[in-house]
Structures are given as C-alpha cells and as structure tokens.
Amino acid sequence: MARTTVRVGTRGSRLALIQTELTLEKLRPAHPDVDFEVVTVTTQGDANQTAPLAGMGLGVFVKEIERRLETGAIDLAVHSLKDMPTVLPDGMAIGAVLERADPRDVLVSHLGKTLHDFPADKRIGTSSPRRHAQIAERRPDLEIVPIRGNVDTRLRKAAGEECDGTIVAAAGLLRMDLAHVITEYLSPEEFVPPPGQGAMAVEIRADDQRTIELVKVADDAGTAAAVAAERSFLEALGGGCQVPVGAYSEADGSDANILRLTVFMAAPDGSSAYRASVVGAASDTTGLAATAWERLREQGASELLG
C-alpha cells in the first residue's frame, strides 16, 4: 500500500511540539500508512514577546498557521484551544478536540506560599487580563507585573528575576513534566480558567473530507461538549470581548449528558467581579451558555461591556 504524507502545522515552542506529538500519538496507530510531517510556524504572538497580548488582537498564536492551512501548505493544525477565536475563518473547522488535561491555573513561586498567604510586598507576574483581575480581586495588596514569554521564560522571570511568582496553566506544566514547580492548584470554580484551557484542537479545512476522516479518531466527545459550552459563553459576549472572562464546564456528577458551566467576568482591576454556575443538557451548549450569561446580567455584569 502506498504511503501518504500529512503535514501538521504547529507553533515551534517546546510545549507546542509536545502537544503536537501527543496528538500524533492518537493518530498514528489508526493510520499506519500515513507519514505525519511536523511543520513549525512562527506566529505573531511568538515573534513579538514584549507587546501586551490583550492589545494584539484575537488569534495571535493561530493566524499564521491558519494561513498555511488555507493555502494547502499544511493539511491540519494543532492548537491550544484557548488560543483559538470562537469564530473561525471561512472554510476552517475544528476536526477533533482531544481529551482535556488538567484545566486549572496554578501558582508557581520560589517563596513556596499560596495565593492567600503571599506576602503583601511581593510581585506576581502575568500577561493575562483574566488572571490579573482574579489576583487583584483576592489580593488587592499585591503588585501585579506584566510578563511575557514561553513557559520556560515565564518560570525564570518568576523565580525572582522580575517577580516572585506567576500564574500559569497546569496543563502546560504537566505536559512538560514540570509538576514539581507547582506551588498551588487554584480551584476552577473560584479562579475560573479561560474557555478551552487544557484542551488541544485539531483544525482542518472544512471541505477536506480525507482529513476530516483521518482526525476524528482523536476526538473526545466529553471534552468537546464541555469546551463547546465554554466557547459558546464567550461568543454570547461577542467573541471579541476584551474584559476579563473565564468559563469552565465539566460533567455534573456521573452523568456525562449533564454539564455544569461556571463563568466569570470582572473589571480589569478586579474591583467588581461576577460569577455564576448553571447546569443543563450537554446537547444544548448554546442554551447553557445563554443561561449563564443571563445569570451574570442579573448581577449587573453587563455594565462591564459599556
């Protein structure tokens, strides 16, 4: 049987390459006649390590990869789902969502202190408006400083070089075998992660039936439903919402057909923050997200959108 080559686009960071390999570990056994060629792409977010992410617009870690997918230079792309805008470019689709790793944020600090016990005269670094708001909400006495860079760079900066700790995604550290650096796991119901955190998505051309069939073996239905609810909440706010937002969904108890969706919105300085948790059918993620947004509106959260 003739072998075929499938080109897989990804960012070139250590974590991105690990995540791509984890994806290929799902695909290779099902397609022994396929050679998967990894193609690394430098995105805008990778090239500019100094500008605040919030000011760089949507899709700064995916646009360049999507352009290569559109032109046929690659056949599929592996992304961290949280980096993907809720509305994809015309002709693009998500072909598979892999089983999610730990969705939580974690605190990493050389001080060995929890967020609650962090000394008031110390600094925590983050480039995320959502993390900034949730830190400031709990600990307005801390200095929050901006830091950018890949995981290794941020850990170095948080070891006292620029700050005394940082908040990062647990999934990235765990995939990089860095669990030992974690000081504290933060509850996803209280310190609400962004939509899709911990999940990887395979993006394809919507009309490429061969690749659609090739990647579907990697799809995890439970994760796909949960992240669909999270992304639907963000889309209900307009998709490009620039206020700090979080959303986390999981099966409610042992019934995979029922989801619990926890959502968060706040002022950038954490001075006002809103949370809601709703339960509904996994088959109606759009309705579940709409109900969650209505709960926040009842609390007054719509004032944050201006």
Image (cartoon, rainbow, N blue to C red):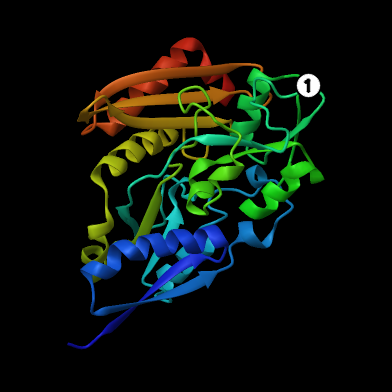
Position of 233 compared to 26: left or right? right
Question: Which secondary structure, mark 1?
Answer: loop
Q: Which of 208 and 256 is in front in this view?
A: 256
Residue 148 in view here: no
Screen quadrant of the C terminus: top right
Position of 155 compared to 172: left or right? right
Provide residue 299's location: percent of width, then percent of height.
48, 11
Q: Nearer the viewer, residue 306 or 27?
A: 27
Residue type at numbered disc 1 = Ala
What is the residue that sits farthest to the top in this orientation? 299
Q: Can you identify the residue that label 1 sits on? A: 120
Q: Nearer the viewer, residue 167 or 4?
A: 167
Screen quadrant of the N terminus: bottom left
Provide residue 117's location: percent of width, then percent of height.
68, 20
Instruction: Kindly identify the residue that appears in the image at 37 percent across and 59 percent down.
Output: 203
Residue 85 in view here: yes
Position of 180 compared to 113: left or right? left
Q: Is residue 40 above or below residue 131?
A: below
Q: Which of 96 and 154 is in front in this view?
A: 154
Q: Residues within 10 Å of mark 1 (few under 14, many from 20)?
A: few
Would you identify the image quadrant in which residue 110 lies? Answer: top right
Position of 291 compared to 276: left or right? left
Q: How many labels does the image show?
A: 1
Instruction: Kindly identify the residue that appears in the image at 49 percent across and 26 percent down.
Output: 187
Provide residue 32's location: percent of width, then percent of height.
23, 76
Q: Is residue 179 above or below residue 280?
A: below
Provide residue 154's location: percent of width, then percent of height.
68, 48
What is the residue that sits farthest to the bottom in this orientation? 2
